[in-house]
Image (spheres, coloured by chain):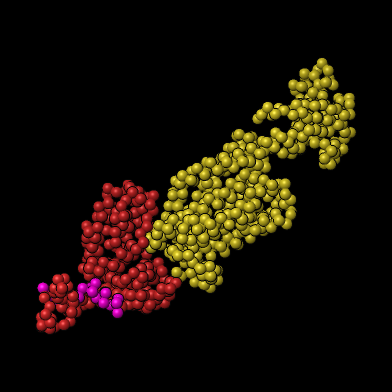
Amino acid sequence: MRVAVNAAGISKTFGNFTLNSITFECHRGEVFGILGPNGAGKTTTLRIIAGLVRPDSGKISVFGRDPERMRDYIGYLPEERGLYRKWKVSDVLYYFAELKGGANTEYWIERFGMEKHENKKIEELSKGLQQKVQLIIAVQHNPDLLILDEPFSGLDAVNINLVMEIVKEMREKRRCIILSTHILNLAERLCDRVLLINNGREVLSGRVDELSDEEVQEIEYRKNGRIIKEITDRDLKDLLNSGYDIISYRKRKLTLEEIFLREVSR
Amino acid sequence: MKRAAVIARREINVNVRRKAFILGVIGFPVLIGLSFLIPVLFIQEFSIPKEYKAGIVDHASILSRNVIELTEEIYSPFSDFTTQRKIVFVIYESEEEVRKALQKGEIDGYYIIPENFQSTFSIKKHTKGLFDADKKLELVIAMEFGDHAYRFAQGISFQEIGKKEKPLDFVVSMFIPLLLFMAIFTSSGYLMQGIIEEKESRVMEILLSSASPEEVFTGKFVGNAITGLIQASVWLGLAGLFSGFMLSVRLISSEIIMVSAIFFVLGYLLYSSLLAAIASISSSLKEAQQATSVIVFIGLFPAIFLSQITSLNPESPAIKAFSLFPLTSPALMPAIYSAGSAGLIDIATSAAILALTSYLTLKLSGKIFKYYALVYSKPKLREVVSLINPKSGSDR
């Protein structure tokens, strides 16, 4: 089955927050990004996909079935990180591996360079290392659907790179990866398609290369001794005639971040 | 349910390694034992009656006087405390007469000297309470026989024909239900603490992405029940050693153990369900403990007065009500039964009410856990109460 996740008009209300009729589809061999500002509804959407929360209305399926029945096929990294602090790293990993019905734990310990820390207690690890343990929990059973809620927060540049590599590897293995992140340049580099949500509503969705297809003019000029950089739709001739001291001018595609800001501020 | 078994095993492993568990298993029974034993020893020491009156039926016609009065000094093994006691022997014509006197409370016990006493040197006795007058009777008989006194003083054997109450039997009987009740509380407490810790540390989210809420709840429930059973077994073992070897008191009957076990299991179901529900809707351990303290107090209320139960009238409406009320019956009913004041119908009625309440509470608690395990804010009471409606869904 090519379609990994099918969400049709899913809604959920928690207190004052409402996730309002979100529709999307994610496929095998694809990295799908769910983007949006804080409180947009990203985590709620991911929890619904992981089978942790049921939508009030709408339909959600993972590989054609109820997500609650697909736990063994789903790997999940929650946004709010937590582990058994008094436990040894290996005990935590093998416990969750057993709950998932078996996993290739040794391989992933090595892959994340955690061999030295296997016998340490969780509370003895740095935040970054704890995050690695959680990532291993999410991927160690080789899930068909990997859900990562803010996977890069708390990681240094080296480990961000490692996570990106692993995500790409999984995509090559025809797994479906759904992630949320506020680091939009990483999302742009990693995601094939994105869904942008704001205040619980879908704002924009599509392929990253198509979304950022729009061409804009970027000029850099000096004004009152200050260098200003801006995107403008004015003609270059007009700009030159209006007496600007232009340093640079180029035509380029909008970044995901710019699209995001534009859509959110509407 | 394989995942539930994995979770249950993990709960047991974590709990039995807790320092609090190890300390509790060893320390608590010692503390409870001492709290029972010390007052009993003091009662023994300070409540020695000033007079002990015993009846004698003298079929061998040895004694020449109808009333014999003596005094004796009693030394306490625990202090320099010494007291004097008057012992009065009264001769009765027949065994029936002496039995009636005992029933009326005119005497504290009686002795029957058989016709063939001089060949058997054996005397039957029926004594009540903690004391007897064997040594003084030996002395009286020896005095009657003059020079042959030594023969009797050395060789008379006394055979108890009444059911003599051993001083610490009732202590052990009270001790076991109380220990089991404490095991209910500690294992339910571990369950509550576990849920809260997993909610606070946000592990619950990973856990629920690996197992269904039903599996997590069942695993935790069973794991903590087994922990409680381990704890109770160790405590019962220690109680057995303590009573059997150190105090030479018979261990409580298998019926009491059975009744205690039934109420332990049902009590665990009830209290664990309640505490798990509280943990599910609480956002911190402190908050949960505050909510739990009321329940714990109600549950412990009869246990606080456990040692008074034997002196209370078990037929009184208050005791009856407490023994049927599900929060108090797990501690009270085994204690009343062990005191010999409850019949099969009382036990069955109390157990049935407790079982029904436990079942309903367990179902509701499971619903609350499923709904609130991932909710970190304080829920409105109205929302929680709405889950009591059987038609309400438990979807988060």
Which of these two is toward me, A183 or B113?
A183
> Drawn colour of chain B?
yellow
Residue B137 in the image: state x and y as whole percent: 80, 27
Q: Please give the name of the residue rendered at 55% of the width and 52% of the height, measured from the top-left corner.
A: B185
Q: Quadrant of the C terminus of chain A?
A: bottom left
User: According to the colouring, which chain is red?
Assistant: A
Residue B142 in the image: state x and y as whole percent: 81, 21
Which of these two is toward me, B44 or B176?
B44
The extreme front residue here reads A224
Q: Compared with residue A260, is residue A102 higher up or lower down, i.e. above or below?
A: above
Can residue B115 be seen by looking at this rendering? Answer: no
Tell me: B50 left or right of B279.
right
Tell me: B362 left or right of B130.
left
Q: Please give the name of the residue rendered at 57% of the width and 49% of the height, measured from the top-left corner.
A: B182
Q: Which residues are magenta?
A: A247-266
Q: Please give the name of the residue rendered at 49% of the width and 56% of the height, measured from the top-left corner.
A: B286
Tell me: B93 left or right of A9.
right
Can residue B146 be seen by looking at this rendering? Answer: yes
Q: Please give the name of the residue rendered at 53% of the width and 64% of the height, measured from the top-left corner.
A: B363
Which of these two is toward me, B128 or B271?
B271
Magenta stretch holds residue A11: no
Tell me: B264 left or right of A220.
right
State the image quarter where residue A254 is shown.
bottom left
State the image quarter where residue A48 is shown.
bottom left
